[in-house]
Structure formats: structure tokens, C-alpha cells
Amino acid sequence: MDKKKKQRYKLKNCTAIQCALTLRELFKLPLRATQGCLLSLVQLLKLSIQIPHYSTLSRRQQTLEVRLPRSSSRTPRHLVVDSTGLKVYGEGEWKVRKHGASKRRTWRKLHIMVDAQTQEVVAVEMTANFVGDSEVLPDLLEQLDEHDQVASVAADGAYDTIQCHQAIRNKGADALIPPREGAVEWPSDEDGRTHPRTAIVQRCAEIGRKAWKQESGYHLTHAAI
């Protein structure tokens, strides 16, 4: 078997394993029952394909790299970024229910980037709860496909940092981030042009933050999540 055939076989094999494990998770099936379910489907469809053994599913699920398909966009994307907390259940939670001794909880933060027009999640990253939202935005933008064009990125005031604005500018997009209270103007670019964030600060001073959000379309995009 040549190299290309091996790659195609490996890809098909991974797809079969991922499909089986998805059905298992969806219907809450044991591994043996998952194999039986797939065998029944193949028989009903009258297909002559092999079904992974339940022991293979058990072994492969530990190292399987899940690839989520994502549709490509023909028009520039309007992206929205935010984060949410996820509570982690484990030994600590059991101790609280059993003894009521501690009120501490373990949390993780899920950072999500969504296409405001299609509601599609285009980038996601999970971090510890002490990681700031603004630290993750550049990494989320790096997850985008190289062919994706970005028109704007909307986020709340927690992302009003030099690092976030620069990452958005590197993508050739407009930053729809309301400046924080008491925000000051940033220095102009080396070519003398006004920094886009400074333009936002000046516009907010002229018409107010609420009017700027309506004028820029911030509310329309940020309502996506």
C-alpha cells in the first residue's frame, strides 16, 4: 500500500471511529451496544462495510483527534467573541454534598468566537478560570482558516487592550469594542494616521457610548451570543 492510499485509509478509519463514538455519546450506549447498533444500521442499509469492534472503539477513543467540519464563507465574516464559565464536577463537589464543609468550586472558562450572520462557532478555546478574556482573543483569531476574511470583531470592554486591537488589525478587520470608562486616546500610527481605537474614543465623546454602539452595529453583532 503506497503512502497516499495509507493516508486515505487512515482518514476513513478515523471518520468511522468518530461516527461510532458520536452515536455512542448521543444515545448513551455502552461500547458493545454501539457496535451492535452500527451492525443493525449496516444491515438495514444493505451495505458491505466493516464495523469497528467495541475493543477498538475503547482503545481509539483515548487518542482520537476530533475534527469538526466548518463551512467556508464567501463573504467577510462579522465575528463576536465572549466567554462563559463551566463548573467542573469531581471530588470537591462530592465533599460539599456529603459534609457541607467547603463552598469552593472549580471552574473553567470557555472562550467562543461566533459568526454573527450564520451563528456558527468558528473558534473555541478552554482555559483556567484565572486567564483573562483579552489574553485568548489572538489565539482564537489564529484558529481561523487562512482563506477566511474578517470584516469586524465585536467584543465587550474586557477586550479593550492593545494586544486585542493589534490582533484584529492584523486580520484587516474593524474592532467593535467599546472603550472603558475614562479611556484616553492612544498615540497615532507611525505614518501619522489616527489609531482606530482612538477614533472610537473620540466618537464616543462626541455622541455618547450608547449612540456609538447603535451607529457601529455593535448591538446587532453582539446579540449573536
Image (spheres, helix red, strand yellow):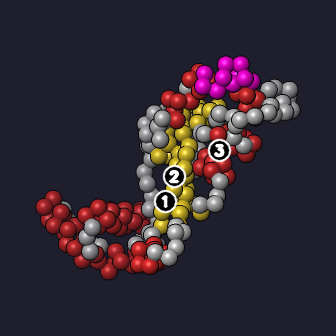
Q: Quadrant of residue 159?
A: top right
Does the segment drawn in magenta span residue 207?
Answer: yes
| Residue 174 located left or right of residue 24 | right
Q: Which residues are magenta?
A: 202-211
What residue type is disc 2 on?
Thr
Residue projecting furthest to the top: 206
Amino acid under disc 3? Ala
Q: Residues within 10 Å of mark 2 (few under 14, many from 20)?
A: few
Q: What mark, if any, has residue 158 been given in the picture? A: 3
Residue 5 at least partly seen: no
Dividing the image into 4 quarters, which one contains the N terminus? bottom left
Q: What residue did someone put label 1 on? A: 86
Residue sitting at 22 percent across and 67 percent down? 38
- The image quarter containing residue 12 is bottom left
User: Disc 3 on helix, strand or loop?
Assistant: helix
Q: Magenta stretch mostly in which secondary structure?
A: helix
Residue 39 to residue 123: above or below:
below
Q: Which mark is residue 84?
A: 2
In this orientation, which residue lies closer to the viewer: 175 or 202?
202
Mark 2 to mark 1 CA distance (whole Å): 7 Å
Front position in the image: 66 or 174: 174
Q: Residues within 10 Å of mark 1 (few under 14, many from 20)?
A: few
Residue 131 on image: x %, y %: 64, 58
